[in-house]
Image (cartoon, rainbow, N blue to C red):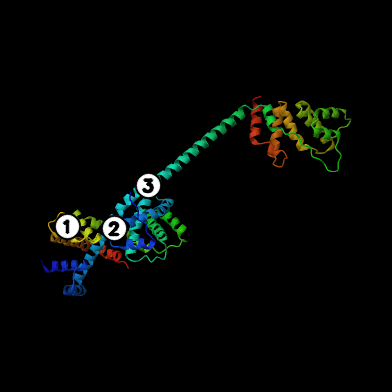
């Protein structure tokens, strides 16, 4: 039987800020906060599927906010996640063209204490385009780049997991893959410019 | 390897934190001074960040699937219990509604003047009037001596309104509705003659009951309807719409 690890707010924040956030910390967020945010979505014209999708988005934005040191702890994690949920769901309603409903929900919740999270989710769609760009890389390219930059594995460890002759071959492959992604970005200067503000948003 | 690819390789090494010493300061200088190299470096940095974001998305995505399974399994028994309670309550409510409906139908179709009379008849209660001596009829009524009261009434030379009223009730209590009707009507006539309104509303009720007991429902019905329609009538609460509907039923199916 798996024993789930428990976190305090500060240890959770610390864990999620790391380059490779531990699975337990992400699971902890789900166990503690999914019901709260799901209730908000379903009570405001969202389906159960909407509630699930929105929470996944909320988790991603929250972790990126933590990594950029934008969460200063002025509100509790639950308040912050609730606020993110509200903003992301309002954005989603806008996208779906349900502006009247969106306005009604916005009016209903505007008196609540609401940390300014709207700026943090403005670039969601641009981020989605970026993900599509990475998705266009071949499977091996994605594996190598993810192993190196996301999982922080050493070349020797990557070599063990993948069928290449030696470390230099892996290194060359990684070089080519990153260069390929760089070229994809430079081929779309407007997207690259916008993404720059998203990724290096201060 | 040409100059461009050398630059790219060094830029990637710089990005990965692998350069030291002269190589490090040379590439930093190139990034500062050369726009093309700086642009390439910015794109490489973006590419690296994109991979990290993509990795995070994949990681959260896979945990998301796993957690949705876990959370749904936890939520299911609760929902199951609630659903069971809800279904059970609905069944109980449905059974109660059916029983109530069957009982109401039975009461409606099995109603007879006698049943309706027995359901609604409440003997008149005599209240003491401070400082006043009781008449012999009042004394007998209070003691429940209805036959004695009736006999005593027959001996009175000029009975008063109250004597008629008590005697009418005595006839009603001893299952002599026809004589009760006769007595109450005399009381009404006396009131009319004297231009008084003694026991007017009480008589309406007990006369209606007398008609009911005497199987004269068509005469009882307008009196009961009048009492039901008047919220200030002292017997208003004793005559419900349900009672009237059953009197109507009996009246139309004698």
**At x 66% / y 36%, what residue is drawn?**
B240
Give the alpha-carbon distance from disc 1 to disc 2, as whole Å. 22 Å
Circle 1 marks a residue in which chain?
A
Please tell me which residue is depicted at 36% across the width and 51% down the height of the picture.
A52
How far is the residue under mark 1 from the one under mark 3?
A: 39 Å
> What is the residue that sits farthest to the top in this orientation?
B254
Image location of residue B67, percent across then percent down? 34, 51
Residue ranking furthest to the left: B1
Circle 3 residues within 10 Å: few <14, some 14–19, many ≥20: few
**B237 relative to B32 in the view: left or right:** right
Residue that carries the numbered disc 3 in the rendered image: B72
Separation of residues labelled 3 and 2 (CA atoms): 24 Å
Which residue appears at 40% of the width and 50% of the height?
Answer: A46
Within the image, what quadrant is residue A114 found in?
bottom left
Can the viewer see residue B235 in this picture?
Answer: yes
Q: Identify the element where label 2 is drawn.
A: helix
Whether labels 3 and 2 belong to a single chain: the reply is: yes
Residue tagged by mark 1? A159
Are the residues tagged 1 and 3 within 8 Å (C-beta)? Answer: no
Q: Nearer the viewer, mark 1 or mark 2?
A: 1
Q: Quadrant of residue B188?
A: top right
Local secondary structure at mark 3: helix
* Residue at the disc numbered 2: B56
**In the picture provided, is B138 more to the left or to the right than A71?**
right
């Amino acid at each position: 039987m798996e024993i789930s690890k428990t976190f305090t707010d500060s240890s959770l924040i610390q864990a999620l800020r790391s380059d490779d956030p531990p699975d337990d910390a992400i699971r902890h967020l789900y166990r503690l906060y999914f019901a709260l945010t799901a209730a908000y979505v379903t009570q405001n014209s969202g389906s159960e599927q909407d509630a699930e999708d929105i929470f996944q988005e909320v988790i991603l934005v929250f972790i990126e906010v933590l990594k950029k040191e934008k969460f200063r702890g002025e509100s509790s994690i639950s308040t912050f996640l609730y606020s993110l949920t509200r903003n992301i769901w309002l954005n989603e309603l806008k996208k779906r063209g349900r502006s009247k409903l969106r306005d009604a929900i916005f009016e209903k919740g505007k008196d609540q204490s609401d940390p300014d999270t709207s700026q943090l989710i403005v670039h969601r769609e641009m981020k989605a385009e970026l993900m599509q760009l990475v998705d266009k890389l071949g499977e091996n390219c994605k594996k190598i780049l993810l192993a190196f930059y996301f999982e922080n594995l050493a070349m020797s460890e990557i070599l063990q997991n993948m069928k290449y002759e030696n470390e230099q071959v892996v290194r060359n492959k990684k070089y080519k893959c990153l260069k390929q992604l760089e070229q994809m970005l430079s081929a779309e200067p407007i997207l690259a410019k916008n993404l720059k503000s998203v990724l290096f948003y201060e | 390897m040409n100059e461009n690819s050398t630059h790219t390789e060094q830029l990637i090494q710089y990005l990965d934190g692998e350069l030291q010493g002269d190589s490090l300061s040379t590439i930093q200088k190139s990034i500062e001074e050369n726009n093309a190299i700086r642009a390439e470096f910015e794109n490489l940095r973006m590419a690296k960040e994109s991979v990290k974001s993509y990795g995070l998305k994949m990681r959260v995505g896979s945990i998301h699937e796993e957690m949705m399974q876990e959370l749904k399994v936890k939520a299911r028994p609760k929902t199951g219990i609630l659903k069971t309670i809800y279904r059970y309550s609905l069944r109980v409510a449905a059974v109660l509604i059916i029983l109530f409906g069957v009982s109401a139908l039975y009461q409606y179709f099995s109603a007879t003047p006698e049943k309706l009379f027995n359901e609604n008849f409440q003997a008149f209660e005599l209240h003491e009037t401070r400082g006043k001596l009781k008449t012999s009829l009042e004394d007998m009524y209070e003691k429940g001596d209805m036959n004695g009261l009736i006999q005593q009434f027959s001996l009175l030379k000029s009975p008063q309104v109250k004597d008629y009223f008590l005697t009418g009730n005595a006839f009603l209590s001893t299952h002599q509705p026809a004589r009760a009707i006769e007595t109450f009507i005399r009381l009404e006539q006396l009131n009319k003659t004297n231009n008084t309104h003694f026991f007017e509303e009480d008589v309406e009720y007990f006369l209606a009951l007398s008609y009911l007991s005497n199987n004269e429902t068509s005469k009882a019905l307008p009196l009961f309807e009048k009492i039901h329609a008047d919220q200030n009538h002292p017997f208003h609460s004793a005559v419900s719409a349900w009672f009237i509907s059953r009197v109507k039923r009996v009246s139309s199916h004698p």
